[in-house]
Amino acid sequence: MHGPYAYIPTIWPPILTALFLLVLATYSWRRRHVPGATPFVVSCLFTATWAFAFALQYAAIPEATKAFWLRFGIMWSLPATTAVTCFILEYAWPGRWLTRRNLVLLSITPLLFALLLLNEAARPFLFRSYIVDGHRLFVQMNGWSWVFVAYAYLLGVINVCVLAWLFMRSPQQRWLVAVMIAGQIVSRIVHTQQIARLDHFDLPLDIPFLLLPYLVYAAALFAFHIFDPMAMARQMAIEQLNAGVLVLDRSQWVVGLNPAAARILSLSPDDALGRAVGELLPEGAVGQPAGAGVAERVLRLGAPPGRDYLLESSPLRDWRGLDVGCLLLLYDVTEQRRAQTQLLEQQRVLATLQERERLARELHDSAGQMLGYVSLQAQAIQKHVHDGNLDAAESQLTRLAGVAAAAHTDVRESILSLRVGGASPCLVSALGSYLAAYEVNYGIVTELVVADGLSDEEFTSDTTVQLLRVIAEALTNARKHAHAGRVRVGLARDNGGARIEIADDGRGFATDAHPNGAAGHFGLAFMRERMAQVDGQLTIDSQPGAGTRIVLSVPLRTGQEVGE
C-alpha cells in the first residue's frame, strides 16, 4: 500500500458515530434557547471530533501518524466530558448550578490538559510510550495522566449525583433520568476496561465508550423530547394546572395524574397509579363520551361537606384513530356553584320584590280606587238617607254594589295570580289548574291544548314561572278589556323551541293604533319584559271585532340538560 493511510472497514464505526453526533448537534442547536441545549451541542461537536480522530488513527499506516491522531482525539476527550457535565447541571436546574463562575472553574482542567498535549516538552508527563496492536495504538499513561483520568471520573460522579437528585425531585422524569444514569455508569465501565486493556472483542471499545451515553441522550431527545419547548410547556402546564388531570388506559386504569389530581383525591401519585378509576371516583362517575365529544358531570369529592368538581371525560386516540385511553379533567366549581346559588336566590328575592311592586300598583289602580269610590258613595248615601231622598240613595246603593262586585273580582284575580306564581314548576299542570279556576270564577270558557311529546321537563323553572305570569296577564286582559267569552291556550313545538298561543274571541283592537295595548291597558310592556328574561319573544295579532291572538316563543332545554 502507498501513502500514509489505507482503507480498512474498521473506520466506519467511528465515522458513523461522528455523523450520528453531528445529527444530534444539529437537532439540539435548533433548540438552543432551551436550558441545557447549548452545552449539549458543544459536547456533541467535541465527541464527533474525537470519533473522527479514531477513524483517521485506524486508517493511518505510520506509527507517528497514528500517534498524532491518537493525541489529537484524546485532547477532545476531557472537554467533551466537561461539556456533558455542563449540560446535566443546566438541565437539572436551569440557571442555578451552571453559573459563569462554575463554568470557568470547570473549563480550567480541560484547557490545561489540552495545553500539555500540545506542548512537546510536557507530553512525557502524560504518556510514557505507545503500544501498537494491529491498526490500533495504545498509550502507557504516566503519573499526570491519572490525575486527569481521576478528574473525568469525578465529573462522572457529579453527573450521577445530579441525576439522582433530579430522580428524587421530579417523579415525572424518573424513567428518563434512570436511563441517563445507566448510560453514565455503563460508559464509565467501558472506559475502565479500555484503560486497563481488559477488552477482548474484535471491535475496540473506544467507539462503544463514545456512543453509549449519546444513544441514551438520543432517546431523551426524540422519545422524551427534553429539548422540545412545546413538550416541556405541555408538561409544565399539566404539572402546574389547578385542575386535576388523570390519564386512563383502555381498561380505565390510572396510568398518569398531575399533582392537582393527587391533591383532590387525597392520594400520593404512587398510590393512585395502577388502580382502577372506579376505586378513586364515585361509581358511574366516568361516562363514555360519544364519538369525539366530551362527557361532563358534577360530583362531590373529599371529606364532608366535600367540594364540587366538574368532571370532563374525553377519549384519547393515537395517530391511527384507535382508542388508547381516556383523559379526565377535574375542575373545582365549588365557589362557582355557590355563587350561582346566591345569584339565583338574589334573583328570586328580586322577582318577589318586583311582583310585590306590581301587585301594589294593581291594588292601587283597582281595589284602592274602588274602595275610595265606595267611601265617597257611602257618604253620599248617608246624606241622601238623612235628607229623606231614598230613591237617590237606592240608586247609589245599586251602583255601589256593582263596584264592590268588581273589586271582589279584582281581588280574586290577584289571589289567583299569586297562586299560579307560587305553583310548582310543572307548566302544563299549573296552567290547567289556573284555567279551571279562571273558568269557574269568571264564567269564561277555557280550552287547553298540549301537543304530543311536549313535557314539563323541557321547560326550565324560570321559564315556567315567567310563562305562567305572562299567560295570566293575557287572560286578565281578555276578561277586563276584550270582554271575551272563550279563551284557548295551545302549547306546541316550533323550530327547536316551544310556541304558546293565547287566543280569545273578544272585541280586539287595532295594533297599529295601540302598539302597547288597547289604550295602554293591556300591559304588553310588562309581558315583553318577562319574555326577555327567558330569551323569549312575544308577538300579538288583533283586529277590532276579530279577537286577539298572542304568541309566545321560548327555547327548550336540550336533551343533555333534561337528563341532568
Image (cartoon, helix red, strand yellow):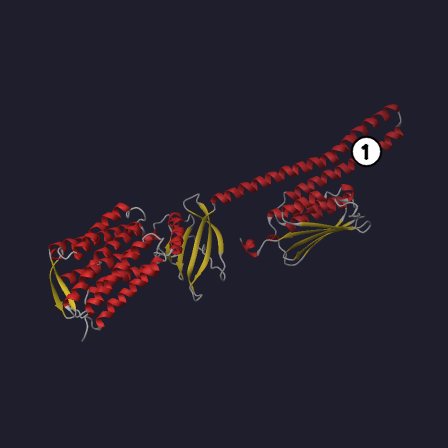
Which of the 4 image quarters holds residue 200? bottom left
Left-right relation of 459 to 191: right
User: Percent from the top left, x then y, of residue 156?
Assistant: 21, 54
Q: Residue at x 72, y 34 (%)?
A: 364
Quadrant where the image shows the N terminus: bottom left
Residue 385 vs residue 338, the one in the foreground: 338
Which of the 4 image quarters holds residue 28? bottom left
Which of the 4 image quarters holds residue 134? bottom left
User: Percent from the top left, x then y, of residue 162?
Assistant: 26, 51
Asked if one can make out residue 223 in the rendered structure from this viewpoint, the answer is no
User: Percent from the top left, x then y, of residue 422?
Assistant: 63, 43
Asked if one can make out residue 456 in the rendered structure from this viewpoint, the answer is yes
Up/down of 385 relative to 304, above or below: above
Left-right relation of 94 to 347: left
Tag 1 residue: 400
Residue 8 vs residue 306, the one in the foreground: 8
Left-right relation of 288 to 190: right
Q: Residues within 10 Å of mark 1 (few under 14, many from 20)?
A: many
Q: Amino acid at mark 1?
A: Leu
Residue 393 vs residue 516, the one in the foreground: 516
User: Percent from the top left, x then y, of residue 109?
Assistant: 20, 51
The number of callouts visible is 1
Q: Residue at x 81, y 51 (%)?
A: 546
Residue 551 vs residue 183, the one in the foreground: 183
Label 1: which secondary element: helix
Q: Residue at x 41, y 53 (%)?
A: 245
> Quick one: which residue is furthest to the top in this view?
386
